[in-house]
Image: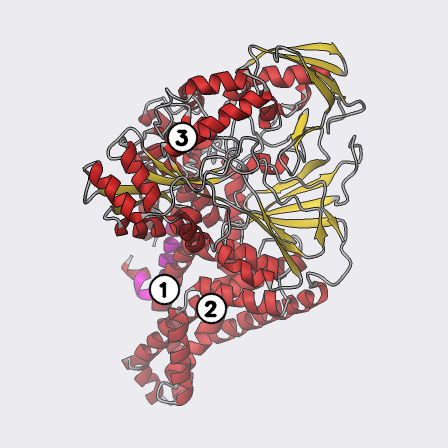
Amino acid sequence: MSPTTRTLAATAAVGGLLALTACTAGATASSPSGEAHDASVTIGLTGEPVNFDLTTTAGSAIPQVLMNNVYEGLVALDQDGELQPKLAESWTVSDDGTTYDFVLQEGVTFANGEEFTADDVKFSLERIATDWAINQPKMALLDHVEVVSPTEARVVLQKPSNIWLYDMAGTVGLMFDASGIGDLANTPVGTGPYTVTERVTGDHISLAAREDYWGEEPAITDVELRYFADVVASTNALRAGDVDMLYNMQAPDLIPQFEADDELQVIQGSSNGEILLSMNNKVAPFDDVRVRQAIAYALDRQAIMDAAWAGYGESIGAMVPPTDPYYEDLNDLYPYDPEKAEELLAEAGVENLSITFDVPTRPYATAVSEVVVSQLAEVGITATIASDEFPAVWLDKVFTKHDYQMSVILAVEARDLLTTFNNPGYYIGYDNSEIAPIVAAADAGSEEEWVEGMKEVAEITATDVASLPLFLFPNIVVADAQLGGIAGNAVTESLVLSGLHWN
Amino acid sequence: MAVRLLKLLGSFIATVLVSTVVVFLLLRVLPGDPATVALGIEATPDQLAAWREQHGMNTPLVVQYFEWLGGLLRGDFGVSYVTGQNISPVITDRLQVTLILVGLAMVIAIAVAVPLGTIAAIRHQRLSGAVISAVSQFGVAVPSFLVGMLLIVFFAIELDWLPSGGWVPPSEPAEFLQHVTLPVIALGTVQASILTRYVRSAVLEIQREDFLRTARSKGLTANLALVRHGLRNAGIPVLTVVGLQMAGLLVGAVVVERVFTIPGLGSYLVDSVGNRDLLAVQAVVVVLVIAIVLINFLVDLAFTLLDPRLRRAA
């Protein structure tokens, strides 16, 4: 073949390929709405699970998929953050607060066909201390589990705790079957309404409803979770009708556009995630409480939320979201007052302050940091941004080595007031000698005493500006207008699928 | 010829070997701790230490390197720190995706660029030639991710003809073609533009050569002389560019892979770096190095076939 004929042949082949594509596309293309939906839903997410083993891999990506959908616990949190029975039909607590008697649901089976009994409760909870590489401290209080009968399990704690049962609604409370843990990373086996049917890394995870599920069978039998590395790609997929719902959407500037679209609905749910301006309490200049207070006065937090996250989110004055039982409105503790900030800085003798601001490479952090830097400049503080790759570099430098002055991070863990401030070895470095006794008394006391104690802790740490929560991160969901039953509030890491249905 | 082949082969092996050492060492000095990334913020120092022990990170670097190299020679890239999966099959899957993408894009680019570039050269003093030049100049300047986004907005969102992204393997031809069309066009447009300009200048150059004047003086028309004697010679510089582009595309396709959420080798590399999944990163880099060196090797080989002088010189 001469070069010319070769070229012609190639052109013809490509032309044919394109023609064929156009035909097939025309034949199978479908519009996002306006027609009957089958029992399937495609959901767009960011942050793909690297594997399915939530006992050895940290982060919220795995529980987002598996918790309440594939695995279930004895108790679960509802959309208002209240504890509800799940695999435990009911429970009673002994007067001294150390013994929990759970009555289990009958007729529950794991996806591998094994029956769920009190033996599984004992196996699952006692295994945490020996086999889990993460979250172990949450079960450190556990003394032992007694199998009273196949449907009755007694859990005995070393000392009373108000937080323990709440933690049981998280990953450490999930129930496993002894014969179903052979390949946790790839084959999760739980009692939940769905099983994982397919996983294509870099693309999607498919879930299918179980026919032998003990509870109510979900209306949506097939769920495809598609993962997007790029925010724009995910919103394009939504607008093209390739996904039905985007959960925890990270592009607030696009929301007005979606709100104007009749075929879509926008839900602003609450979350447990605080955008936290963390200050290293152990190094200068933040080892001086006056400097931290000056920062609190210097920052207009409403303006930061408006500029960085299009005004979506909620103002909070302490490390406590309004859905927590010990929430109190502390927003007015440090109103925006740049003059007061300058006075405090002068008092602390740190005029013309120059600091390094470690910013993880996340959209929210970058957006927030620019506004923070410009507001600090107005009170004479020069903040130089050091960009830290997230998670690897940020975790290593800021979190592990505490090699930083100021940083900003989305603290997603639920009820993390104590994790953050009741441990001087934590990266914040807050001196907890004042709050530690209050915490200990509160956790061992009655529920009322606990709520009161925690309120006190919140107030002390907020007054001390142990760190500055800038605002509460919203959980924004954009979905097809006909999709109902969306669990918009991110009360746990889990994205609950069982309530979804097409209207 | 045989000597030339042996020389090429020798430099091929040496390049790959050196690159394994470089990538292995570079990754060891990269900031960030794989154990912390894997176990997260609630892990205790004991658990971190146990994780490092379990993943063989406490053995001397030299031992780690040779164990890894030994695996490589057997085609075994090891088990990922993060996913717990064997890396080799993942690489095979991802490479296949990227090769399909890049291969189709290059085929389209060549199919478009060779005729257009030739026309632009022959008619360089006329309007049609100038138009082709201008358009290709514009195409070079527009990044492929922008082309991709425009294609998505128009064909996926407005017209709803094709999906906005995702990947279906060729075993399902109809769906595969739907999914592959837009990304291939996005990648191919830029490549076609670049190539058109190279073809044009190569053909222009050739037209001034003595041997074409000789051919014309023997009675061939200018165009016929070009087709019979010129294009073959113009092919050499163009081929070099195609080789370079192929190599660049293997790495550069990552941007288009992101825009269209395609699970290719590039996205795997980016994710693995983020997770400090060192063995996976090493595997991808080695595969890319081999691919790039291999492409250069093939280009060299093709030169030899196209140009008899090189064959004799060897």
User: Horizontal and vertical percent for residue B85?
Assistant: 53, 33
Asked whether residue B238 is in view, the answer is yes
In primary-sequence order, the first of circles 2 and 1 is: 2
Indicate whether B62 appears above or below A367: above
Q: Residue at x 69, y 64 (%)?
A: A29
Mark 1: which amino acid? Val
Foreground label between 2 and 1: 2
Q: CA distance from mark 2 to mark 1?
A: 15 Å
Q: Are discs 2 and 1 both within one chain?
A: yes
Q: Quadrant of residue A122?
A: top right
Q: How many marks?
A: 3
Label 3 sits on a secondary structure element that is: helix
Chain for disc number 2: B
Which residue carries the number 3 mark? A461
A464 with respect to A474 (left or right): left
Q: Give the main secondary structure of the magenta stretch.
A: helix
For residue B189, the mark is 2
Segment colored magenta: B293-310
Q: Nearer the viewer, residue A408 or B14?
A: A408
For residue B241, the mark is 1
